[in-house]
Image: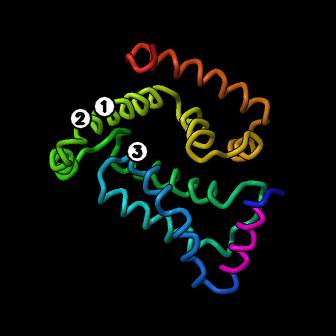
Amino acid sequence: MNKKIDKEKFLVDEIKKDKRNFERIYELYYNKLKNYLRKRLREKSLCEDMASAVFEKAYKSIDDFKWQGVSLSAWIFRIARNLLTDHYRKIGRIGETVSLTEIENFFEDDEKSAYSEYIRDEEESALYDAIREFNEEDQYLIYYKFFEDITNIEIGKLVGITESNVGTKLYRIRKKLKKILSKKGIFK
């Protein structure tokens, strides 16, 4: 068992004894969760509402949490993924929304950093557009591996495939992603 899992087990045990300790989970994962949601929703207020809903659901179901070889963070992000899926079903489409506030905030940035911020945003946007070209399962493999830094073993357990199958799929995904980004001018 790795140290991260040991720490998480201890934390879950502490929370099950006293729910006030749940605040520590919030502190550990809020920013990562918010970034994860922001990349899928883009509307700040909706991201914050969704993050609150994820933590509320985790809080209510922490007593039912059982160790099945995956990390606590993977469990939290699985809740987020399920809530996102529900959200997209409700609105009847998979897509993004951009709020007027988000557009206004872009133009209110400091002018010195606006251009470099614009370039970075364009590259990041191209990356996320490229990731959206993959099927949902592959998108989650990308997220787990490169955004959550989860091992292939843990990913395999999360998605129900072998570690070697995870490695093979990620290799193919990287090749395809590089090809897509080359076409968009990100990789030369």
Task: Please report the residue visible at 58 percent of the width from the left and 77 percent of the height from the top.
Answer: 22
Residue displayed at 58% across by 32% down: 138
Q: In 3D space, how far apart are the residues under numbered discs 2 and 3 (Cα atoms)?
A: 21 Å
Mark earlier in primary sequence (2, 3):
3
Which residue is the site of mark 1?
119
Write the residue at 55% across / 18% down: 176
Query: Which amino acid is tagged 2?
Result: Tyr
- Which residue is situated farthest in the right direction here? 1
**Mark 3, secondary structure of its residue:** helix
Q: Residue 88 vs residue 32: left or right?
A: left
Q: Are marks 2 and 1 in contact (CB under 8 Å)?
A: yes
Residue 163 shown in magenta: no
Quadrant where the N terminus sits is: bottom right
Position of 9 with respect to 173 (left or right) is right
Magenta region, residue range = 5-15
Name the residue carrying label 2. Answer: 115
Q: Residues within 10 Å of mark 1 (few under 14, many from 20)?
A: few
Q: Secondary structure at mark 1?
A: helix
Q: How many marks?
A: 3
Which quadrant would the C terminus be assigned to in this image?
A: top left
**Circle 3 residues within 10 Å: few <14, some 14–19, many ≥20:** some
What is the number of the mark on residue 39?
3
User: From this viewpoint, is residue 160 visible?
Assistant: no
In which quadrant of the rendered view does residue 118 lie? top left
**Three-letter code for the amino acid on which mark 3 is drawn:** Lys
